[in-house]
């Protein structure tokens, strides 16, 4: 189909081609109907899609892919839209493929400890279905009540218990994928290992650029007999950050190890009444789970380490209700930000644990530099930071300053040996920051993988992997060992 057709004409032609092979209810083309799909959780970036499709089974997903490939129409896969990096932001002349209606739990096997689910099944719904068997699905993003397993696969999501139980990639055994060629392939398997290349780990975290998930087999784990949480208070953030390293250095791997600074605690406490110490400069939430004896022993060891590390106060949950209350504050940190700021910009970088204190001090300096507040909430145990930059989009240039603040945080993460994302993905939000982390050779390798799955670049194009032109345009030239990547490009 000619790409120079007026948008209205193009919309009509593509919608007609889709409706000729799909039920009417599956295709939305009226702008009023497609408006709810104009952005994901990164609402600062919006684009009205040309068409939205809502397939109800795998066959319809394949049909949509075939039609779009034949017409040369670009596609943006979408889960629940809770992502925070703009990975599901539509394209003005493209088709959104929402997997929301593929929401069936296909099989629950408590003996093999697996669940086979469609991509539109909510994260928390898996654990709810597995609960009668004493099992649950371990990755628990803060959005688990709404986010879907297909989106979790796309972003390699984690959660507050990822330190001990791993990210999505560690808990998914198999995915069934529809490719842009209209084929359906299976990556991984329910056995301990699968033959051939490990394409499953390549696919998980690929942000919808390699194919569309139609079915996922996840690993279930036994629900611990008991779990308790320590809330440790610290008089300064640096001492709290160093305590994180002390816990891990002691050979303890908590079920969860999270940190919040005073700004975060004070914005959350009036919202959920979690019992947080709002006078502390920082609090750590450290969870132990297992048998009653295991939990008692680990709580004792962690308490001793935290006291030696400089904790000013320690409280331990006395019941399951109190444990959930402690976690409710951490899991509601993002919505609670609305109590103290009209807008917030959530970053996602990962650093070595030993550099937590250094990066937090750097963020404090950046608050002065950019004239904006930042609430720090993060998965301290694995160094995954989630700074919430607070701003007011109604004030001139505040959003631009928030973006620059975020980019500076990510640059600092790379500088100390970390990476620009841990679980939120790159999407469009961090695509410029990719240029400061990766060399031309590395970016070329990423594109080679993309071409192997999608030679025409129709699946979620212009996301996650920056072109050399984009890197030059943004001026993201990074010197490494005296060498500039993209040395052959003219400097502007």
Image (tube, rainbow, N blue to C red):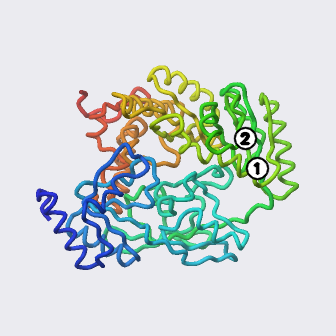
On the picture, is 477 further left or further right than 204? Answer: left
Residue holding disc 2? 275
- The foreground one among 53 and 85 is 53
Which element type, helix, strand or loop, lies under badge 1? helix
Measured as percent of width and height from the top left, residue 237 is found at: 66, 28
Residue holding disc 1? 322
Q: Residue 415 carries which label?
A: none
Measured as percent of width and height from the top left, residue 116 is found at: 56, 74
Quarter of the rendering occupied by the N terminus: bottom left
Report the residue at 34% width, 47% height from top: 444
Measured as percent of width and height from the top left, residue 433 is found at: 40, 37
Q: Residues within 10 Å of mark 1 (few under 14, many from 20)?
A: some
Measured as percent of width and height from the top left, residue 406 is found at: 45, 33
Depicted 272 relative to depicted 92: above or below:
above
Report the residue at 55% width, 74% height from top: 105
Is there a contact, CB below 8 Å, between mark 1 and mark 2? yes
First of labels 1, 2 by sequence position: 2
How far apart marks 1 and 2 lie (CA) works out to 9 Å
Which of the 4 quarters of the picture holds residue 471?
top left
Q: How crowded is mark 2: few (under 14 residues within 10 Å), some or many (20 or more)?
A: some
Which of the 4 quarters of the picture holds residue 401?
top left
Report the residue at 66% width, 42% height from top: 258
Which element type, helix, strand or loop, lies under badge 2? loop
């Amino acid at each position: 189909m000619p790409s120079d057709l007026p948008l209205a004409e193009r919309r009509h032609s593509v919608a007609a081609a889709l409706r000729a092979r799909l039920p009417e209810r599956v295709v939305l083309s009226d702008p009023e109907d497609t408006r709810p799909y104009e952005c994901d959780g990164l609402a600062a970036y919006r684009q009205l899609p040309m068409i939205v499709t809502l397939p109800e089974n795998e066959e319809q997903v394949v049909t949509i892919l075939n039609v779009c490939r034949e017409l040369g129409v670009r596609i943006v896969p979408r889960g629940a839209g809770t992502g925070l990096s703009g990975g599901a932001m539509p394209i003005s002349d493209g088709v959104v493929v929402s997997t929301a209606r593929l929401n069936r739990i296909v099989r629950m096997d408590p003996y093999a400890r697996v669940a086979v689910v469609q991509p539109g099944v909510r994260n928390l719904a898996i654990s709810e279905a597995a609960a009668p068997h004493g099992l649950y699905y371990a990755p628990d993003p803060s959005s688990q009540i709404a986010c879907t397993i297909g989106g979790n696969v796309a972003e390699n999501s984690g959660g507050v218990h990822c330190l001990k139980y791993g990210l999505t990639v560690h808990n998914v055994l198999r995915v069934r994928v529809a490719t842009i060629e209209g084929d359906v392939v299976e990556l991984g398997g329910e056995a301990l290992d699968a033959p051939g290349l490990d394409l499953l780990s390549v696919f998980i975290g690929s942000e919808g650029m390699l194919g569309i998930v139609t079915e996922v087999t996840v690993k279930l784990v036994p629900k611990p007999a008991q779990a308790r949480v320590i809330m440790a208070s610290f008089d300064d953030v640096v001492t709290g950050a160093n305590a994180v390293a002390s816990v891990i250095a002691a050979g303890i791997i908590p079920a969860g190890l999270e940190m919040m600074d005073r700004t975060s605690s004070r914005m959350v406490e009036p919202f959920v009444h979690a019992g947080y110490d709002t006078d502390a400069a920082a609090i750590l939430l450290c969870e132990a789970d297992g048998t009653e004896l295991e939990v008692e022993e680990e709580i004792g060891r962690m308490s001793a380490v935290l006291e030696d590390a400089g904790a000013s106060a320690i409280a331990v949950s006395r019941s399951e209700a109190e444990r959930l209350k402690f976690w409710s504050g951490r899991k509601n940190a993002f919505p609670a930000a609305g109590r103290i700021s009209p807008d917030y910009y959530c970053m996602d970088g990962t650093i070595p644990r030993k550099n937590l204190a250094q990066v937090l001090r750097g963020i404090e300096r950046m608050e002065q530099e950019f004239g904006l507040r930042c609430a720090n909430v993060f998965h301290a145990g694995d160094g995954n930071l989630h700074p919430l930059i607070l701003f007011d989009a109604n004030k001139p240039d505040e959003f631009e300053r928030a973006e620059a603040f975020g980019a500076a945080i990510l640059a600092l993460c790379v500088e100390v040996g970390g990476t620009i994302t841990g679980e939120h993905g790159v999407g469009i939000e961090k695509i410029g920051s990719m240029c400061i982390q990766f060399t031309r050779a590395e970016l070329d390798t990423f594109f080679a993988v993309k071409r192997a799955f999608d030679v025409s670049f129709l699946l979620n194009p212009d996301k996650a992997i920056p072109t050399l032109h984009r890197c030059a345009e943004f001026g993201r030239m990074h010197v490494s060992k005296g060498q500039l990547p993209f040395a052959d490009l003219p400097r502007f």
